[in-house]
Image: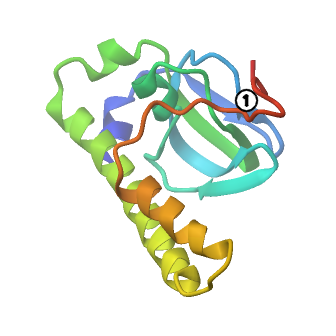
Amino acid sequence: MTPLLRACRGLPKRELAAGDVLMAEGQQMTALFVVVSGSFVVTRGSSVVASVEEPGAVLGETAFLLGTAHRATVTATAPGVVHVVSDIEEFIGDDNERVLEIARILARRLDRLSTYLGDVRSQYSDAGGHLELLDEVLAELAFGQQPEADPGSARDPDPLY
């Protein structure tokens, strides 16, 4: 059992059926969720960005940490159960083990993403033409200091809200 699952003993649980939406893109953050069981898919727009199946995985942490609405939709792909952490700051408190576990989860996700971006960069770095720009963009995303993200585009400046 992971440290976060141990810490969640006694917290409310939410049961989900396949197809149930746990959180929706653009929805204000109201809770953090810790996976007990099940399988979940994370989507942004129509793109699948992750699958989550590990007991002890955290969902909704990005919105909490950044103080934003959810930037992705999480949908159960199989029946599942999550712990609902409604008072996140109280849950974390000054418990370094809980903070460290959330940091490890985020670090593993960042490591997988960095590995993927490195692979994409190496595939397109010598492509020439407009694909050459992809190498520069990915390098900046992976290693540059980024301003706070502003979702949308000139065509659709406010797609979520």
| Image x and y of residue 82, in percent | 57, 35
Task: Give SS at disc 1.
Answer: loop
Identified by mark 1, the residue type is: Ala
Q: Say left or right for 132 vs 109.
A: right
Q: Is residue 1 visible?
A: no
Q: Say left or right for 49 vs 146.
A: right
**Relative to residue 67, is residue 102 depicted above or below?**
below
Residue at point 72%, 55% (across, down): 48
| Image x and y of residue 41, in percent | 69, 51
In front of the other: 33 or 24: 24
**Relative to residue 53, is residue 13 depicted above or below?**
above
In front of the other: 161 or 81: 161
| Image x and y of residue 28, in percent | 63, 16
In front of the other: 22 or 26: 26
Q: Say left or right for 118 vs 50.
A: left
Residue at point 56%, 85% (across, down): 123
The image quadrant where one finds the C terminus is: top right
Residue under label 1: 24
Q: Quadrant of residue 98?
A: top left
Residue at point 67%, 44% (across, down): 80
**Relative to residue 11, is residue 129 depicted above or below?**
below
Q: Quadrant of residue 143?
A: bottom left
Residue at point 46%, 19% (across, down): 67
| Image x and y of residue 102, in percent | 33, 40
What colour scheme governs how the chains and residues are painted in the rendered image of this protein? rainbow
Q: Quadrant of residue 69?
A: top right
